[in-house]
Image (cartoon, coloured by chain):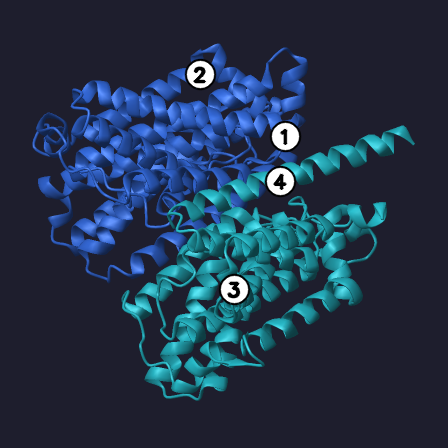
Chain colours: A blue, B cyan
Amino acid sequence: MHGDETSVAAPGPAAAAKPMKTGSVRFYLTNEFGLVVLIVLFACMFGLLTNGRFFSAFNQFTLGRVAAVNIMVGFAMMVVIVTGGLNLAVGAMGVCSAMTFGFLVEWAGLPWPVAALAGIALGVALGWINGFVIVRSGLHSFIITLASMSIFFGVMIYLTKAQSFRAIPPGFSAFGSMRLFSSVSPLLVVAVVMAALLVFLYRYTVTGREMLAAGARPEAAELSGVRVGRVFILCHMLSGALAAVTALLVVARTGAAIPSMAGQQLGQDWLLPAFLGPVLGGTLLSGGRVSVIGTMLGAVLVTMLTNGLLLLQIGEFWVQACLGALLLIAVLIDLARRSYLAHRRMV
Amino acid sequence: MSRMVQTDWFGPLAVTLLAIVIIGAFNPSFLSPLNIQVLLLAITVNMLIAYAQMIIVAIGQMNLAVGAIGGLAAISFTGMMQVWGLSPPVAALLAALIGLGAGIVNGCFIAITGISAFVITLATLSVFKGINLAITRAQPFYGVPQSVKDFGNTTFLGPLPWLVIPAAVVFVLMWYLLNRLPLGRFILAVGGNTHAAELSGISVRRTVIAAHAISGLLAALAGVALVARLEIGQPTIGDDWLILSFAAPVIGGAVLAGGHVSTVATLLGVIIVAIITQALVLFHIDPFLVQVVLGLLILWAVGINRWREVRVARSLKRI
């Protein structure tokens, strides 16, 4: 057993006849194992370098809060990467949902659970628009979501006049500052529950298996009776819902719905964390293979590195450069790992 | 006539002329010298940005780091003049070299590892942007010499800004590269069919690196030109280039899968975007809507391109 790697369509004939001899090597070469090792290593390093401040209850709490958002944004991207596409509009969709939530609780006076559901529904609707246009036009999701991120964000900024909604109900923002067992944020619990649901989706439900099959090889899936277009649209709707939940977590954390919460420019700031999690976790960019646990561990590693670099006061401005370099190193290691595995299988 | 209609530049040219006539009729100040000068300034910088992306679209890839390279070049251009006291031409040359180097780094990573350009340029985007922020600490450089400011904001022959001259040179060179030089043909061949290009003896690796180097150079030039125009070395330069850089080539009929771009039509795409942005300002439409219009323009353009592709495929089938 190795993590919860879920894949359909084994890449090559040799993989079908997995030799037992290389089983343990395969385990040590999984992304999940590598990530756990890295997380433990860096945690020890930061703990020593900061005299234990890294492990303080408060730091663990803030770490969990940020990690929850990074995990969720990684999931929002992962569910679309499954189709072999991508969704540049995660940030824009998330902000749209969060602003709708803010508007509904502040101006319409709705109770927050209703408003949150409405925000998520908007995310699903925006995802449906993306998916529908992509499937119907047959164009690559890159260009469609590039255009839609501009449109969604532009409409949102136009309607809100770039103003924030600050009257978030205390019940909702308390959720963001609450601490369970003095160091665990409920936001992290939300992310973990989502992860469990996604694992269940991809392992045990027909829809999840169809998503993987359609992503791995659309033509083959179509021939075996999967309605590929509908499944792709579903993936984009799921991405919209997850992006909306992410944005709501950010609202709970900051206590306000701010138009620039995903970056000044079209929500672009979410793109790097959104890709870091899945890519570090071993999700194939060409589609058909996901690793929910890997995405989660990847996001945790990224959050930890950011937090540690800030605690060490290396310079807040270098953090972004470090994260970019991390993504580069991650894809290079992934490449080396895959070529090693391919080599071993040949032997 | 029907051949002309099928070219890439015919549609955008018709839209451009139509837009000029309609907007000019409704609002005569659109054709005033001052407005033409503002338009030309916007077009020169945006053309460089669009070409930086177009050359990558030509090889069937994408470069998310165009803005980050431009921003890095812009702040190093101003920084070198302010902190080291270099003369503007030397600083501009060094900034262009930085852009070239950044492009080569992108190209090498993509060509040697074979990892998708999207992931590599997403990573280098934040590396370059991070270096930018680490140098500037998010504060702008104000020490732009008067000569540079003059170059960016004065005109000759009526409303023609000086910045038009380097832009015109780049336009001619790009046209010559893509239509007459072996390297340009190699780039298009690799974009059209990488495997076939490799089999016919083109070094795909070297071509990809060259395309990214050119892209980096053009992005750096755009950054330097923008500093001359804004008279300030902003660390935020380049943040909003992503949509723009794709909009113009796509409006100009570029095929995102690679192998087909048009220098002239991309310039027309830049002009259309500039005219529409300007029209929104002239008619007092909310500037926030510019983003929406850009997004819709991209969708409209890819829709048209797609429709043309389908039609061509059908007519081929009939034969």
Residue under pointer 2 = A203
Q: CA distance from mark 2 to mark 1?
A: 28 Å
Task: Answer yes or no: is residue A290 visible.
Answer: no
Q: Report x, y in % for residue A124.
A: 39, 23
Of all chains, the one bearing label 3 is B
Labels 2 and 3 within one chain: no
How many numbered marks does the figure carry?
Answer: 4
- What amino acid is found at the position of numbered circle 3 in the picture? Leu
Q: Above or below — where is B180 with respect to B250?
A: below
Residue at 51 percent of width and 16 percent of height: A209
**Towards the viewer: B223 or A21:** B223
Looking at the image, residue A70 sits to the left or right of residue B223; the answer is left
Q: CA distance from mark 2 to mark 3?
A: 56 Å
Q: Report x, y in % for residue B169.
A: 65, 74
Element class at badge 2:
helix
Q: CA distance from mark 3 to mark 4?
A: 25 Å
Q: Nearer the viewer, mark 2 or mark 1?
A: 1
Q: Above or below — where is B164 with respect to A174?
A: below
Q: CA distance from mark 4 to mark 1?
A: 11 Å
Specify few, some or many for label 1: CA neighbours under 10 Å numbering under 14, 14-19, or 20 or more: few
Looking at the rendered structure, which numbered label has been put on residue B302? 4
Residue under pointer 1 = A138
**Image quarter hosting the N terminus of chain A:** top left
Specify few, some or many for label 3: CA neighbours under 10 Å numbering under 14, 14-19, or 20 or more: some
Q: Nearer the viewer, mark 3 or mark 1?
A: 3
Q: Residues at badges 3 and 4 in contact (C-beta under 8 Å)?
A: no
Q: CA distance from mark 2 to mark 4?
A: 37 Å
Residue under pointer 3 = B39
